[in-house]
Image (cartoon, rainbow, N blue to C red):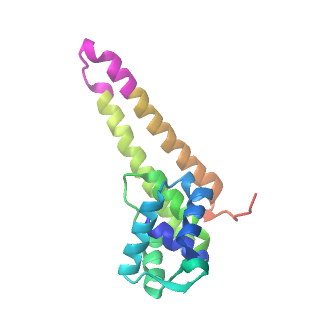
């Protein structure tokens, strides 16, 4: 969450209230956060020197801005390796802020997105292969059937994500980024 907050603050300085509204109006589509978790993340970012209070606004409202250390941390997160686990959140949070990355770095970031989806898809397909070879006791057949359907959903969503990144973000023929045009 800290990196998402840094990204939002790189767009413009914001108060806690502004950040909560920013999460509610867009970021919550791929990243869920409560006002308490946003406040804790802000406190942590301040403790680590990633953000500072730019000024105190009306009614004592603190408006936060990113420090150079915060810019460096955000850049490292954007361009660094993406951890497997919550692939959708890892990808969508970076895609949301891809316009903040230098144009020369965007291709590498998107390639890492594609690699993460591909690796996770391969792991899911291996799980499916093992699942299909497993002998299931009769009394667990219905449980196993729903587990397999759940696994199928995960595979299908990763296939979709891979196709979507390739068709909406990168040009498969040239492996270059497609121009981004607001809809």
Q: Which residue is drawn at 74% across and 63% down?
A: 181
- Residue 50 in the magenta stretch? The answer is no
Q: Is residue 172 or residue 81 the one in the foreground?
A: 81
154 up-or-down from 80: above or below: above
116 up-or-down from 71: above or below: above
Instruction: Residue lying at the far front in this picture: please name it.
Output: 59
Instruction: Residue lying at the far right in this picture: please name it.
Output: 183
- Residue 145 in the magenta stretch? The answer is yes
Q: Which residue is drawn at 24% across and 20% down?
A: 135
Q: Which residue is drawn at 40% across and 33% down?
A: 151
Q: Position of residue 163 (x, y in %)?
A: 57, 47
Q: Which residue is drawn at 52% across and 61% down?
A: 93
Q: Can residue 102 be seen in this view?
A: no
Q: Is residue 35 or residue 71 the one in the foreground?
A: 35
- Is 78 positioned to the left or the right of 173 in the image? left
Q: Can residue 42 be seen in this view?
A: yes
Q: Is residue 20 or residue 91 the one in the foreground?
A: 20
The quadrant holding residue 171 is: bottom right
Q: How many labels does the image show?
A: 0
Q: Where is residue 102 in the image (x, y as percent from the top left)?
A: 58, 78
- Is 161 positioned to the left or the right of 123 in the image? right
Q: Position of residue 13 (x, y in %)?
A: 58, 79
Q: Where is residue 41 in the image (x, y as percent from the top left)?
A: 41, 68
Predominant secondary structure, magenta span: helix
- Is 112 positioned to the left or the right of 166 in the image? left
The C terminus: image quadrant: bottom right
The N terminus: image quadrant: bottom left
Q: Is residue 51 or residue 151 the one in the foreground?
A: 51
From which residue to which does the magenta span run? 132-147
């Amino acid at each position: 969450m800290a990196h998402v907050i840094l990204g939002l603050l790189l767009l413009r300085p914001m108060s806690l209230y502004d950040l909560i509204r920013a999460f509610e109006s867009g970021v919550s589509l791929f990243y869920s956060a409560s006002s308490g978790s946003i406040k804790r993340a802000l406190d942590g970012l301040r403790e680590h020197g990633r953000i500072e209070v730019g000024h105190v606004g009306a009614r004592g409202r603190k408006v936060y801005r990113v420090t150079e250390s915060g810019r460096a941390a955000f850049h490292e997160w954007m361009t660094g390796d993406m951890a497997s686990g919550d692939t959708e959140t890892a990808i969508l949070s970076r895609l949301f802020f891809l316009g903040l990355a230098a144009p020369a770095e965007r291709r590498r970031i998107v390639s890492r997105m594609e690699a993460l989806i591909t690796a996770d898809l391969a792991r899911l397909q291996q799980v499916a292969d093992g699942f299909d070879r497993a002998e299931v006791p009769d009394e667990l057949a219905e449980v196993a059937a729903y587990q397999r359907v759940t696994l199928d959903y995960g595979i299908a969503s990763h296939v979709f994500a891979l196709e979507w990144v390739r068709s909406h973000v990168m040009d498969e023929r040239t492996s270059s980024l497609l121009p981004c045009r607001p809809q």
